[in-house]
Amino acid sequence: MDLDPHVLDGAGVLEPAAFAAALHGGTARLGAPRALPDGGPEPVSMGIPGVVIRPGDHICAFYRGAAQRDEVLVPFLREGILAGDKCICVMDDPDTEPLLAPLSAELDLERSMRTGQFELYDSDHAYLPGGSFASDRMLGYWERGFHDATDDCGYTFVRAVGEMTWALRDVPGVEQLVAYEARLNDFLPTHPQCVLLCLYDLEQFSDGQMLMGLLGTHPIVLMSGQLLDNPWYTEPGEFLAARV
């Protein structure tokens, strides 16, 4: 694995604060560009040129600021709407105009929302109903959304995305974030026709321990326009057992 030496301590162990600084400074390198093995679900375009995803993927997107977020989010949703996919988007930023305006300029977005193909929610509705977070409840939220899309409405592919800055609020349950991300790796294989993209803004997420937890719970990372295999990923059972 290719890592800059200054993110390691004297024993060669990853030092979270240094790694966070390297990640913020753009000098941290994760894994090689993702190589899709033969077999398995047919890959589909993510919307970013040259980037393909597979049903069942659980992806962590690191970026800096709203403009870079939308460079990922807009093409991801545009590609899905054009392909006839179900799109579920949960935003923490109350200003959704930078997302909706470019989509509306190219698509009949009003129709997509009216028919239920594209659903846009805020984090208070999805992640924090009643002002708290609970991982069991959130997994149930995705379960209902995916079941409704595929079993009830007949969609063959679902693109779900969540902007995760809500987890930085001082509300009950946010300490479950990393465990929730780990549990998603058991949950998503039961919904192989779905993909989940988790959006993490490095201008707001700066805690090294939290960033290492996020890396440990996402098998694939999107960074600087590339999907990367994540060498820090740990299978959910092992990851959760180590936190007990």
Image (tube, rainbow, N blue to C red):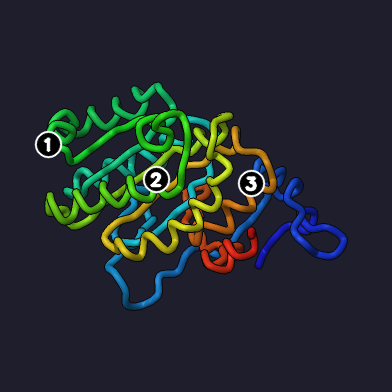
Farthest residue to the bottom: give it. 38
Disc 1 crowd, CA 10 A, few/some/many (<14, 14-19, 20+): few
Q: Which of the two labelled residues, at mark 1 and mark 3, occupies the earlier sequence position?
A: 1
Q: Which mark is residue 201?
A: none
Q: In this view, does 58 lie to the left or right of 19?
A: left
Q: Are marks 3 and 2 in contact (CB under 8 Å)?
A: no
- What kind of residue is marked 2? Met
Helix, strand or loop for disc 3: helix
Up the image or down, 159 lies above or below 104; here it is below
Q: On the rendered image, what quadrant is the N terminus found in?
A: bottom right
Residue placed under numbered mark 3 in the picture? 210
On the image, the x and y values in percent for residue 14 come to 74, 58
Q: Which of the two labelled residues, at mark 3 and mark 2, occupies the earlier sequence position?
A: 2
Q: Residue 138 carries which label?
A: 2
Name the residue: 40% across, 75% down. 37
| Nearer-the-camera pick, 158 or 80 | 158
Note whether residue 31 is visible.
Answer: no
Name the residue: 16% across, 53% down. 155
- Give the number of the mark in front: 1 or 2: 2
Farthest residue to the right: give it. 10
Disc 2 crowd, CA 10 A, few/some/many (<14, 14-19, 20+): some
- Give the number of the mark in front: 3 or 2: 2
Q: Distance between the residues labelled 1 and 2?
A: 24 Å
On the image, the x and y values in percent for residue 223 come to 52, 49
